Amino acid sequence: MIVNNLTPLELVTHLFSCLQIADNQIDWEEKEVWADTLSALFPDHTPDHAQEVLQIAYQTILPMDNFGRKNHIIAVCNKLKDHYSKEQLQNELAPKITELIDADGMVLSAEVDSAAVVAEELGIIIDISED
């Protein structure tokens, strides 16, 4: 999928979807973090449109293998840098990513690996407690 035409809301949704899918399950708590993140970053979004975007993201990402998902994360991160400053990414997005990874109460190595790719590509620090 080419990410060049995705809106910032779609990019954030694709990023969060990749992180949600990293552990091969999508938990309700993780969806709540995604919804809260959209409300914080995009206060004028409509929940119905956001759900459509989420479904499209899942349909795009689920068939990908690990290599494809990693490349998708990299492409999404590179495009996010066109829309947000490093400070915005660190102060607004990084804490939400931490919250997403911690949401289901388990931090798996696949999530940590995906978050590391995000942190490296965006040049941010994502605080992950692996206890």
Image (cartoon, helix red, strand yellow):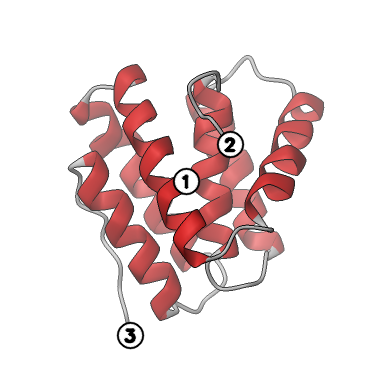
Q: Nearer the viewer, residue 11 or 40?
A: 11
Q: Residue at x 52, y 48 (%)?
A: 16
Q: Quadrant of the C terminus?
A: bottom left
In x, y percent, where is residue 88?
27, 27
Q: Quadrant of the N terminus?
A: top right
Res. 102 image quadrant: bottom left
Marks 2 and 1 close (CB-CB < 8 Å): yes
In x, y percent, where is residue 100?
49, 57
Residue where numbered disc 2 is placed? 1
Q: Is residue 57 left or right of residue 112?
A: right
Residue type of the residue flagged with mark 3: Asp
122, above or below 105, in the image: above
Q: Residue at x 64, y 61 (%)?
A: 29
Marks 3 and 2, how far apart in space?
35 Å
Residue type of the residue flagged with mark 2: Met
Q: Is residue 79 left or right of residue 7?
A: left
Residue where numbered disc 1 is placed? 72
Q: Residues within 10 Å of mark 1 (few under 14, many from 20)?
A: many
Residue type of the residue flagged with mark 1: His
Q: Which type of secondary structure does the marked residue at label 3 adopt?
A: loop
Residue where numbered disc 3 is placed? 131
Marks 2 and 1, how far apart in space?
8 Å
